[in-house]
Image: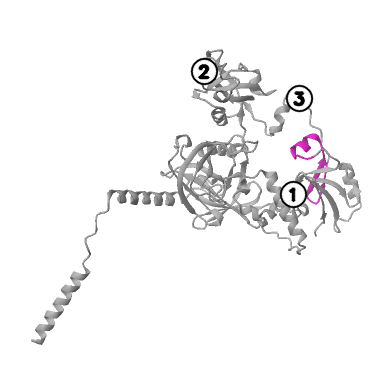
Amino acid sequence: MIKKIAVTILSAGLLGGAVANSPAQAAEPSEALKLAQQLNQAFVEVAESVSKSVVIVRVANKPQAAGVFGNPLRNSPFFDQLPEEYRKFFERQQEERGDREEQPRRPRSREPVFNGQGSGLVYREDGIILTNSHVVENADKVQIVFKGGREYDGEVLGVDRQSDIAVVKIAATGLDAARMGDSSKTKVGEFAIAVGSPYELDYSVTVGHVSAKGRRVFTDQFMFDQDFIQTDASINPGNSGGPLVNIYGEVIGINTLIRGVNTGIGFAVPVNLAKRVAEMLVEDGKVTRAWLGVSITTLREDADYRDLAVGVEDGVVVRQFVPGGPAESSDLELADVITAVDGNSVKSAEELKRELRLKKAGVSVTLGLMRNGEAREIEVETGAFPEDITTVSRLRRPERKPEAEEKAKLLGMTVRDITPDLAKRFEVEDDEGVIVTEIENDSAAAEKTISLGDIVTRINSAQVDSVKSFKAALEGEDLKKGVIVHLNSKGSQRFEVLKQYE
């Protein structure tokens, strides 16, 4: 009887346990939830796919720029947007502040210090890496780090400041190259996914949208030919050079800069432009831009001329020929309204520039235009945009044979007599002294805060007003003991002691 009761109780317990532990019928997810889950999985798959082609770009900067990383402004998202001369000004301020604290100098290190970091992507499977020029333009050494920890030394093949694109070569093959999209087909409102290493937080993924296309960020000569993709995907310092991709995992832009803190406004170089620049840098080590050599306005915005244009409402007005420019001797005429380039419609000055920037200098383009109410097509051979924008106004001057410039060196620092061209190039006054035009890496001069464009006015107590007097001032001096170099840097008077090390 006892055994029967026990069996009954045990059976009841097992049955009760089975009932208690049986899962409740799960509710079928709604169609909306299923769609959200699919979208969630899509973002996961894109991030996993793209990350294989994203790299960390570690940079050991040249000695003369080392102070930038002690500058608290360096971590500001505004810093990379500043023109170079302003960045150098703040860097010098920080370095001089450190000098005034009279801290003992550390022994000179021969090993590179990787104190800068950005992002990049694999452009080609044979080791071509794409990044921003502002990430590597001052690099002494570059390291490329892949997800998983593989490291390679990198060689900078070329940088282009005006588009902020650079290419780096590593000794590797069979890499997972990023899938390149077509930024001309990118639409405002599409999903945008940024992958990079903001604030050294490697392989961070942020999601947003394409907020706008064709944005002009700078109106001065810096990045003068640029139009950006705007995104609200979070981009921060360190994202620079990394990809902005669409929901298909295709690169549509190269993340470059942000505007303000926590504004949700970031900018990327359109991938079509980035690819064009990258190919030129790989092939030639530099970018040669096509131009017509004309001053232009958008017809609809040209209040003076739009009512006088006959038979056309949209286009680009030829306002002025740049003296000596390629269009000056062509069939193009003043007041022509350009409406197309090689069959592609142009309605604004920016659209005309966009069409030309993808052309190779020296090729002929077919311009569709309206002249006195009559539609025409003419051929114009493009030229190469002058590397120095200040030379544009001097193109008609007779060519002078370059004279052998006298120069002198002092412990890694090269100086020359100040000429009008050098004064304009370095934006200094054509004053007495000699100008610093080169600083060798890992030299005594590079350890100091001496910058290109600084003017040497005295060596010890000897006045310097030419290369000849500079050399004379150094005669008989013991460089192991050191010499006092008086400098004028953008109006700031100071001195540095240069000494020869054993």
Other-residue count near label 3 (Cα within 10 Å), few / some / many at <14 / 14–19 / ≥20 = few
Quadrant in which the N terminus is drawn: bottom left
Q: In the image, what residue occupies the spot 74% across and 49% down? A: 440
Q: Position of residue 353 (x, y in %)?
A: 57, 29
For this view, does 156 lie left or right of residue 193? right
Residue 219: x and y, percent?
62, 36
Residue 487 in the image: state x and y as whole percent. Answer: 82, 48
The single residue placed furthest to the bottom in the displayed view is 2
The image shows residue 342 at horizontal and vertical percentages of 52, 23
| Residue 411 belongs to magenta span | yes
| Mark pair 2, 3: CA separation | 37 Å
Cα gap from disc 1 to disc 2, whole angstroms = 57 Å
Q: Earlier in the sequence, mark 1 or mark 2?
A: 2
Q: Quadrant of the C terminus?
A: bottom right
Residue nearest the viewer, comparing 129 with 391: 391
| Residue drawn at (61%, 48%) of the image | 78
Nearest to N terminus: mark 1 or mark 3: 3
> Which residue lies under the disc numbered 3?
397
Provide the residue span drawn in magenta: 407-428
Give the class, few, some or many, for how many residues have Cα within 10 Å of label 2's Cα (few <14, many ≥20): many
Secondary structure beneath label 2: loop
Q: Secondary structure at mark 1?
A: loop
Q: Residues within 10 Å of mark 1 (few under 14, many from 20)?
A: some
Looking at the image, is 414 positioned above or below residue 145?
Answer: above
User: Is 259 in front, or is 196?
Assistant: 259
> Which callout, 2 or 3, points at the residue further toward the start of the chain?
2
Badge 1 amino acid: Glu
Labels 1 & 2 near each other (Cβ < 8 A): no
Tag 2 residue: 312
Q: Which label was assigned to residue 440?
A: 1
Q: Amino acid at mark 2?
A: Val
